[in-house]
Image (spheres, rainbow, N blue to C red):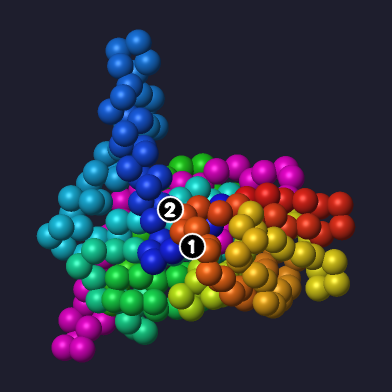
Amino acid sequence: MLYLGYFYFDAALRSLNIIDRANKKDKKDPPTAEWLQIYKNVALNIMLGTIQPTVTVVTPTKIPQGGTLDLRITASNSNFNLFSVVQIDGGITINDKIVISPNQLIVNITVPTNISLNRYDMQIDTTLADGSIETAHGIGVIAIEAPPEIPEIISTVSLQNNSQILISGINTNFTSNSTSLKFDDDKIAITKLIVHSKTLLEAQIYINNGFKFGLHDITIITADEVITH
């Protein structure tokens, strides 16, 4: 599922949903230790973000072992630039980064296949114009889970004011000759589809009048492989 609109609120909405669900739990249905820890991480990152550089939202938040995908990172009180260095615990490799703004980065990562199933912290060090180092932390912003056994989309990231979309999969078999993509809204036209690898697609799109802002499903078909996300 992909959010197309003025901002990228999917992860923020998920975080608010986590807090809401935790708050609605009662004594008959108490929150699990995992839910409580997620709640604490979200709340702490939001609070820290009001007073210091802090990674507040990472999307997607759940990442499979062995996956290679793009993350959108949003921070508060940060000054990201070309000299920003992203580090994620657990031996996760940072392959590339794109600076969107002083508060947003897109990074491409590869997750080890043998990494423990756990939540991991993130740190971003940025060299500023005066030579000082700004450090933004994000506590438990990434959760590693077991990889799926079937083809799945694990990341969708929008660039260029929503005109370019990067789609990462796992166990997928994208090919230049047979892969197609469509949205659930016929006002979104695919102008170009580029297959970079079996697990990475790039779609260039045009949004026509009448398009509805919000979350949209995408369907990717490669021969008999059909994935809706």
Residue 94, x across and y down, in percent: 49, 69
Q: Quadrant of residue 23?
A: top left
Q: Is residue 92 left or right of residue 85?
A: right
- Residue under the point 48% across and 78% down: 160
Judged from this view, the residue extending furthest toward the top is 28
Instruction: Tell me whether circle 2 and circle 1 mark residues in contact (CB < 8 Å).
Output: no
Disc 2 designates what residue?
Answer: 10
The residue type indicated by label 2 comes to: Asp
- Residue density around tag 2, few if under 14, some if 14–19, many if 20 or more, within 10 Å: some
The residue to which callout 1 is attached is: 4
Above-or-below relation of 228 to 205: above
Asked whether 152 falls inside the magenta stretch, the response is: yes
Q: Nearer the viewer, residue 120 or 187?
A: 187
Asked if residue 21 is positioned above or below residue 55 in the image, the reply reads above
Q: Is residue 93 above or below residue 38?
A: below
Query: What residue is rendered at 22% in x and 83% in y?
Result: 128
Q: Secondary structure at mark 2?
A: helix
Q: CA distance from mark 2 to mark 1?
A: 10 Å
Residue kind at label 1, given as amino acid type? Leu
Magenta span main SS: strand
Residue 101 vertical placement versus 186 (above, below): below
Picture coordinates of residue 153 (x, y %)? 64, 54
Look at 35% across and 30% down and name the residue there. Answer: 21
Going by the picture, which residue comes out furthest to the left?
51
Quadrant of the rendered image containing residue 110: bottom right
- Where residue 5 sits in the image (x, y, percent)? 43, 64
Write the start and end of the magenta stretch as one range. Answer: 127-156
Q: Earlier in the sequence, mark 2 or mark 1?
A: 1
- Residue displayed at 56% across by 71% down: 208
